[in-house]
Amino acid sequence: MIMRRAHQWMGMLLILALYALMRIYCAFTFMSEYFDYDEGTYLLIARLINHGYLPYRDIFAVHPPFYYYLLSLWLRVFGDSYVAGRMLSVLFGLLSLIVAYYIGKEIRDWKLGLILSGLLTLDPLLIEVNSLVFHESSIEFFTLLSVYHFIRYEKTGNDKYAYIALFWAGLGSASKFTILPYALALYIVILFSRSELIVSHLQGAVRVIFNRRQVFILATAYLVMTLLVMATIILWPSWYVRAVVVVPVIHRVTYWDQIIPIMILLLIWGSLTLKIFNSSYLPQVRDMISFSLHNLKRVLLLAFAVFLPKIVVEGSLGIAISPDYLSQTYLIQGRRHFPIINLFVFASDLFKDIYRNTLEFWMFVLPVVLLALLVLAIWAFSKKVPISPLGRSIVVLSMITAFVYFGVSPSIITARFILPLLLLVNILLADILYALPTIVHRKHTHILEFLIILLFLVADFGIIYQYPHGNLKFNYAVHTKTMRDDLRGYLSSVNINPETTYSLNPMNTYYLGTNTVPYYTDAFGLILLKGLNSSTMLKIFKEEGVKHFVISTWAYYKWVNKEFRDQLRSFISAVRMSSALLYGESYDNKDVLEMYSQSIVSNPKGPLYIGTYNGRVIVWVNSTEIAELYAVDHNVTLDFRTLMRLNLNNGTYLVTQYSNVPSEQTTFELSLNGSEILLSSVSLPLVFNFTHEITIFAGARHLKLHQETNAPVDVYCGDLHLKIAGANATVQKVSQTELKITGNGFEVELTG
């Protein structure tokens, strides 16, 4: 007994130590524009709460209030920094492991508790969310607390545990609404658990869905659907038919109209399933309605257990604060996605990763893949899947949860947003792994367990090391922290107080520690969900006295939603033409950070403007990019990194460009004067790479490819005419779109 208890404690301590090592390392290491927008939003809202502002009234906020206020309290106690904020997620994840251990103990014994805690520790998705300022760590904790009490209810039949389970799910929904599909599924399972008839209906549905014959039914349904699509395209081979009439999952689901073939596929699959299994659903629905009507008190009491924490938390911290609360947090969320197609979008994304060979994306759903693989392998050997009696209750709960997420919820389906479902999958995976020795030789079991752990460790290596180094296909801005520190260093060196600053990515504002316009913290929510346009926002910012704007990698990302993407581009263009570039830094992997000043206008006349992107200087005529500028040194291009800093004394930019070897760099000065760009102190040749083909004339002589001539020259690019002049400057046409200028100083003038 003492030895067994020692094994329990030793095993749990090792798991907790491994958890702490991985999460804390990631909390200090991870920083990327592509995911820290949400972190910055939550951190900035928490900071503003501590400064006396209230969400929904003073701050536009799209999530319920519980996490915002908890985070603000945490920052007040432990310090206002992004690392301190991340430690709250680390704590939630740590508590979740302890709860997971007790879930395993309730289902079987302490060994299952260790297996489940170990799976959660190694889960790549949880490694990410537990290391960042995300709601999901709180959702993980409340989901597992809820599952624990659900298991206690299933074991004892004591309604007390049913109410507690629903209470925790309800409290979790006061943190983020993505737990609501799970809460609804839990409510349904608990509500009908008192009816043996309905329980048998639900278990029968599970046996029908998770049945070997379903493999053949799905194959038949897809073959029939493929033939229907083929025939349709042959009869009506228009672009619309080809775009809409597709085989769902196999083809990418991108248009709303594709719900038509989705419904046809579901009809084929459903008809085959009902026919082959000789099933029906109308009597089952009738039984559920009848049971609910005869047990209205139970229906209401269980619903009250879910809504009590929502009423208390959201009522006092949301509805009582602002009449817009429900609109901001719930009503506008319906614009994100459309029910029914969610499953097919999710599955088609998985197939897309196979086509594109970007299978690293699968590591966030690794438990699902492993569970499916184990079940199929067990079926292949004509074995019964070894699930415990309580595990069967988790299967029913998982099935209904999946149905609500994929068939009812309007939310976008990503691994992070279906975390409660993935946690249930982890429990089932742990349960099957525990029981494998009952159907597989112990030697083979150990080999299988070793391979599964090895696969998790490989995925963990990917998320911990490869991911933040930008070696995988994920969007990861590897220079994010470096650029933010560089900007802070520049502001300190020139003694600039940023005052009121607005950034499209709130993390920039938070990291710089500047004042902002509280209500407009969340640009993504305001533009995409509320429909606010960029011109209105800029007008408001002018009235609110915004002095500086920060534009960075997140804003330049090619978002799928064209309307949102266009609004961001419009915002950036308007800022560029109405402000002076104060600081700019970019890398060749498209990491970029720029700060613009409203109080300094370096080129009030226009129409030439400059900035930096992709490791080069970018030249615009009004809102149209016309050329990229970078230095060359023989065969070496210095376009790995570009750094631009405004000299406040003379209005000249000091431009430093680097190759991928840090010691290879050059510095020159650049200034704007209406339609002229003046370059001086140039030590290396500069290449102008235009967006269109160019024609160069030196007087009356047309400059051909690779020819060189002395300035001045006339350059024609589309409808634009530029004149390049400078003492001792030479111009060479190096390609159809590029020219190289050599000389200590020269000017580029837009003449027409």
Image (cartoon, grey):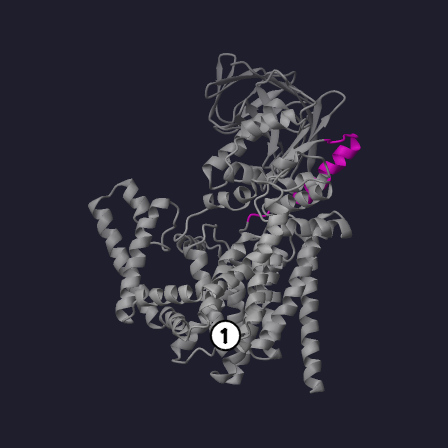
User: Mark 1 highlights which residue?
Assistant: 391
How many numbered discs?
Answer: 1
Q: Is residue 558 left or right of residue 547?
A: left
Where residue 676 sits in the image (x, y, percent)?
Answer: 61, 17
Q: In this view, does 363 lie to the left or right of 380?
A: right
Q: Which residue is drawn at 52% across and 66% down?
A: 424
Where residue 649 sits in the image (x, y, percent)?
Answer: 77, 21
Where residue 608 sits in the image (x, y, percent)?
Answer: 58, 20
* Quadrant of the rendered image containing residue 672: top right
Look at the image and tell me whether residue 628 can be seen.
no
The part of the chain drawn in magenta is 475-499
Q: Residue at x 48, y 50 (%)?
A: 411
The amino acid type found where label 1 is placed reads Gly
Q: Is residue 56 left or right of residue 87?
A: left
The extreme top residue here reads 700
Q: Which residue is drawn at 38% across and 49% down?
A: 253
* Quadrant of the rendered image containing residue 140: bottom right
Looking at this view, is 10 or 623 the one in front? 10
**Where does the N terminus fall, quadrant-wise?**
bottom right
Magenta run includes residue 236:
no
Q: Which residue is drawn at 62% across and 52% down?
A: 313
